[in-house]
Amino acid sequence: MELIRTQSPDLLIITVKGRLDSHWAKTLADELSESVRAGAHHIRLDCKELSYISSAGIRVLVRAMKDIRAIQGSFFIRNPSEVVKSTLALGGLSGLLEKDTPAATASSGATDASAGESEPSSATVAAPAPLDKPARSSTSESAAWETHDLTPSPSPSNSTAAPAATPGFTCVVRGRSGKLTERAFAAGDCERVEFAGDKLGIGLGAFGETFAEGAGRFGEFLAVAGSAACLPADGTKQVDYSLSRGALVPKVQMLYGLECSGSFTQISRFDTLSDKRGTPVSEIAETVLNLVGADHAAIAILGETAGLVGAFLRKSPVAAGAMPAGSREDTGASAATLGADEDNPEPDFADAFASPSPAATSGGATASAGPARAGQPGPELELFREAADKILEFPQVRDWISLTSERGYARSLSLAVGIISRKPGATAGGTATLAPLLRPMGKPAVPGDLSTAPPLAGHLHAAVFSYRPLRKGKLDLATTVHQLFEEDTAQALLHLLHDSRDLIGAGESEFIRGAVWAAPITGIRSEGTN
């Protein structure tokens, strides 16, 4: 993003060029704050060349308007690009536009920009409420549980999904996940998917209007209850987010992943027993499947972490030939500049690939899943290498993936979203299976040998926030998640893994306490051959 200041005696004009996402939001916020401190009380943002604005950017604009109005000043947007104009109009924020802007004068009755800053729109978010029935109490190996049924709300007015015949979620498996291992994604693999309040999603995606905008940024994303978050694989490592507001619905340019439509049928509170460190995510998954009485379920976990184990992409998996001119990959930058600093790895993501596998050193194919040896990529990393691939052999894998070498983000608050199953190959009333997106979750009977693990499988993405206690009593997922993104900054977004390497493996993610929203998956279909 580029900021250009033009000062006149009574007015400061700041021209904004590029993308106003989570990475650049603070830069603009600081510029506006310093301008006010320097005496500028009447400010206009010229957004003619602003190509994208996320919810993080909207938050900066709304806050600036409130702060400047409080000192009897004025703050408006002039010359909005079509993207900015439509985003603000859909979000009911046309009051931010300068009055002589056509979009501003045409939006009669538009919601004032100061309204609804922290609350999602009820027209967008389907928010089931607990029934007035006593909680069902139960105990698993590591935790005590209390479960409430939920009353499904009507589908939101802007939902594109057909009404569910039975409570729960119907899922669409999108894209070709196998292209990840060969870095073969191109424009034809990209779909723009809306995630209204009745949808849940995970996969690889990016925010933007076109494939070209996301080409150098495609990374892990999650979506639930009218909120979506992406971790751009462009080296910034700054989680961006988009929230439902008025008629504005989060949209993700998706390479592959899962889109589920429906509503949660129950909420369970869990608290780890006093003699345990935490409750493993596999135990949470097994318990939830028993509670909903299904073999497949969609879940959202919001809880305090004992530690997370996961990975994220350092670089976009778009094919080099499909990269637009001028993108990060097109510039010929080295792997070191595109990923983390190899000499100074992040504390939570130390190098987990200490030495090459025999296959890599001999020039042969990558070894298949089996017992891992110290210094080799663990079998859980087979999720990235179902074939002898090109980009994920040692040592290239270090340029492409960051992996937790031990549990990280302890005593944080995490939102984990995804699917779980104990019959990965079953169709669950549809024409397809979830198998292409499912990874082993259970603990192997023989350490490091996934063939001895129970049939429990899943795929979860987790956004990490600073710690805050969860409210007791009734907890609305949509409102809670919306406020979490608005009031905090996501520290990371991970694909959760089970690192089952013998002796040196980090194990799996664990939660101390939290809430789990869940529902059975009642139908599965596929759009794309995985």
Image (tube, grey):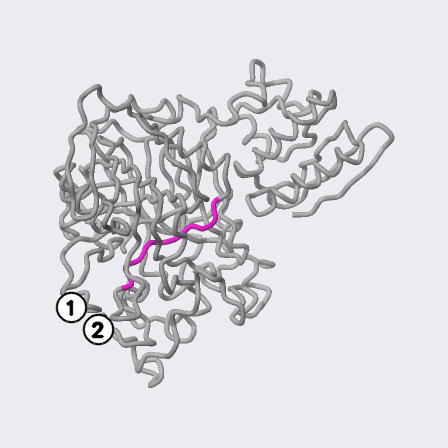
Task: Work out which residue is located at the far bottom of the displayed protein and give it.
Answer: 362
Q: Is residue 403 above or below residue 47?
A: below
Q: Residues within 10 Å of mark 2 (few under 14, many from 20)?
A: some
What percent of the width, then of the height, locates residue 227? 42, 36
Q: Which residues are magenta?
A: 490-499
Is label 1 or label 2 in front? 1
Q: Position of residue 470 (x, y in %)?
A: 37, 34
Residue 111 part of the magenta-drawn span: no
Q: Badge 1: how crowded within 10 Å, few (<14), some, or many (20+)?
A: few
Residue 267 image-quadrant placement: top left
Q: Which residue is mark 2?
A: 371
Residue 15 sits in quarter:
top right
Task: Find residue 66 and report its horizontal and vertical position in percent.
Answer: 64, 25
Q: Does the stretch in magenta take in 494?
A: yes
Tell me the element at label 2.
Answer: loop
Q: Earlier in the sequence, mark 1 or mark 2?
A: 2
Mark 1 — residue? 446
Quadrant including the C terminus: bottom left
